[in-house]
Amino acid sequence: MGWSLKIKEEKNKETLYRFWSESSDEWLTEWSTREEILKFLFWSKFDKFIDDFTKEAICFPDGWCEKGTMKYINGDQNKREEYYRLAIGRFKNNPDVLIERFKEITRNMNIKIEVVNNKGEGLKN
């Protein structure tokens, strides 16, 4: 399952776009310009990066294959559970819990991240 794109041409020759989610069976965006869609894609992919990196930082080396043997590395079960508690909590009752953990991890690694829009909205650690 994934996303599909609907395109329409307005009378003024402007092209508008809209994303549909096949998995949740709903529109993800309103009719939007190319620039607005690209911003939506940026924040969606950035959100996925936060999720992926946070999982990696908590669970590493879980899930990797060892060079030479190609043996699957089964990491610490408690770390996996910690990550999944955060991920589930994000969707149930606290959407910022995973982002806060990401900020904590990157601060502890002395990595400064600031990704904001022109309104100052976004992520700063």
Image: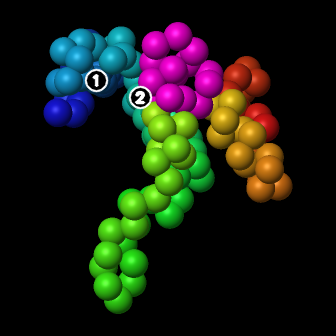
Image depth: mark 1 or mark 2 in front: 1
Q: Are marks 1 and 2 in contact (CB under 8 Å)?
A: yes
Instruction: Rate crowding at label 1 as few (under 14), some (14 to 19) or many (20 or more) other CA atoms within 10 Å.
Output: some
As drawn, is 18 to the left or to the right of 91?
left
Question: Splitting the image into 4 quarters, where does residue 3 fall?
Answer: top left
Magenta span includes 88:
yes
As drawn, is 7 to the left or to the right of 60?
left
Element assignment for label 2: helix
* Residue 124 shows in the view: yes
Where does label 2 land, which residue?
37
Residue shown at the point (40%, 61%) measured from the top left = 74
User: Which of disc 2 and disc 1 is earlier in sequence?
Assistant: 1
Residue shown at the point (51%, 20%) measured from the top left = 89
Q: Which residues are magenta?
A: 85-98
Image quadrant holding the N terminus, namely top left
As drawn, is 15 to the left or to the right of 107?
left
Magenta stretch, overall SS? helix
**The label number, if any, that marks residue 19 in the structure image:** 1
Q: Position of residue 115 (x, y in %)?
A: 69, 38
Q: Amino acid at mark 1?
A: Phe
Instruction: Rate crowding at label 2 as few (under 14), some (14 to 19) or many (20 or more) other CA atoms within 10 Å.
Output: some
Residue shown at the point (20%, 24%) measured from the top left = 23
Q: Position of residue 122 (x, y in %)?
A: 67, 28
Judging depth in this view, the residue of 108 and 66 nearest the camera is 66
Q: Position of residue 96 (x, y in %)?
A: 62, 22
Q: Amino acid at mark 2?
A: Ile
Q: CA distance from mark 1 to mark 2?
A: 9 Å
Residue shown at the point (46%, 48%) measured from the top left = 77
